Amino acid sequence: MSNVIECNNLTHYYGKKLVYENLNIHVQEGSILGLLGKNGAGKTTTINILNGFLQPRSGECLIYGENSQQLSPATKARIGFLIEGHIQYSFMNIHQIEKFYSGFYPDWKPAPYWELMSKLKVAPNQKISTMSCGQRSQVALGLILAQDPDLLILDDFSMGLDPGYRRLFIDYLREYAKAENKTIFTTSHIIQDMERLIDDVLIMDYNRVLAQCPVNEFMSTFKQFNFELDNDKHDLKKEKFVVNLEKVKNKIELYTYESESFVLKFLQDNGVIFKNFQQTKMGLEDAFIGLTGKY
Amino acid sequence: MWKSVIYKEWLKIRWFLIGYAALGIIAVGYIFLKVQHDIAFMEGKNYWYSILFQGLQYFGYLKFLPLIGALAIGIAQYFPETVNKRIKLTFHLPLKENKILLMMHAFGTGSLLAAYLLIFSIFYVLSNLFFPSEIINGAIATVIPWFLAGLTTYFMIALIVLEPIWKYRAFYFIIGAFFTSIYLNQTITAGYAPVNPILFILTAGSGIALIFSAYRFRKGEM
């Protein structure tokens, strides 16, 4: 499969503050990639570079082979873009905004838009500015579905949505993407949502990439072990196999890509006295926090 | 695509444009109500004498009218684009970024010019009912810089509102205020007549200033 998005050696600074250096991202056609990271890790920066709203200090992003800083109108027509907070032209109502966008896209498909709008309890002339965040999210999603783009770039789609609207958004999106072989590049603060949606995960921390792989591979290789220490002689944090270690009194949460037998053998070989050792099953959010740390 | 761009811009400015046109008609109506009153009060020959030899500007109320329209339409058109950086939506539409921006700008300029033309036409027609061509020509030469000041203000509003950084906005505001005030400095009737073509060229030149702010936005200045 070909790459729809290809970011090569992307480096960016805000003033003297490094956001990231030599970041490489590849998103294959038909896949759904979730970009995860703490606040300030560079998620929106990446989205802005992809959409041509930010010029990176060095490196480049190619979308369908074109530099994202100079996308042609034909390529832009293939990209659906959801701005953080479901921003739309809020001075329009749902009829006006559909009429406006339909003029730009020859293959405009109004049916999915009106299907979503029929679920909203809004007056025909109600302006978008007076709608709830959840209703606005459905308008934004409906417009993207009507545009029928090949690539969807979604910046924090779950922001401000209640669980019901989040679930509706995700279910619609995943079904649409898989049925139509669409590619999605998305960020979200709510990682449980990502678990239902994404195929591949890219986890960023300040200045670096911590993981980039299929989400199933990540979840099967990254592990959490819990145990209680009876002596505290060995500084486990310094060990190479330890990705992260959280300690409350003598209770340890150890995160690693190594197997249970490897960790047990290491502890025994190094004279660490412990009890109640167990592997803990993680969700994607647990794994994300395990990888990036709690703060 | 032209239709869609015009549709969006129309939705943003329509009430401001209609309101401004109504204000313009009322202002011109008031000017000539006062002219009629003053002619009845002073007698025609004395009133004309005041205009021709004592510098009376019966059209003085027009001075800031174009400016008001430019402020109203410029802010109504460009401010909604900057709320939540909504201009990203515009730039993401399948057109070249500068092309769509200039399409929006052309519509705003055209709308403002249409309002100006309406106000000016009523002013011209009513002037012909009261004054000879010598007085009317002097009035036209005087109000042209005021209308150019309005257009320049509209262009400056676009530059200022689309600029992503506040301190640069303040800087552009000072430059814009100084630049626009040049057009309004004439004190005698037709005082700027010899330089009106130069003012016209300056105004036309400032028409594409917003491209600079848009370029800075797309580069990611914040």
Image (spheres, coloured by chain):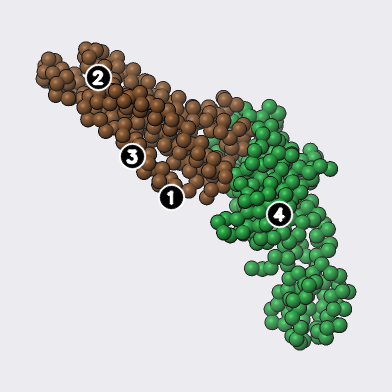
Chain colours: A green, B brown
Tell me the distance, in whole angstroms, between the alpha carbons under discs 3 and 1.
Answer: 17 Å
Q: Residue at x 29, y 32 (%)?
A: B184
Q: Residue at x 68, y 27 (%)?
A: A106
Viewer-proximal residue among A278 and B60? B60
Q: Residue under circle 3? A: B178
Q: Residue under circle 4? A: A23
Q: Is residue A249 left or right of residue B61?
A: right
Tell me the distance, in whole angstroms, between the alpha carbons under discs 4 and 1.
Answer: 32 Å
Which picture quadrant has residue A239? Answer: bottom right
Marks 4 and 2: in contact by CB < 8 Å?
A: no
User: In the image, what residue type sits under mark 1?
Assistant: Lys
User: In the image, what residue type sits under mark 2?
Assistant: Gly
Element under disc 2: helix
How far across and how far down the image is residue B89, in percent?
59, 39
Q: Residue under circle 2? A: B138
- The image shows residue B44, relative to residue B11, as above or below, that is above
Tell me the distance, in whole angstroms, between the alpha carbons under discs 2 and 3.
Answer: 25 Å
Tell me the distance, in whole angstroms, between the alpha carbons under discs 2 and 4.
Answer: 67 Å
Q: Residue under circle 1? A: B167
User: In the image, what residue type sits under mark 3?
Assistant: Phe
- Mark 4: few, some, or many residues within 10 Å (few <14, many ≥20)? some
Tell me the distance, in whole angstroms, between the alpha carbons under discs 3 and 4.
Answer: 46 Å
- The image shows residue A91, relative to residue B33, as above or below, that is below
Viewer-proximal residue among A213 and B195? B195
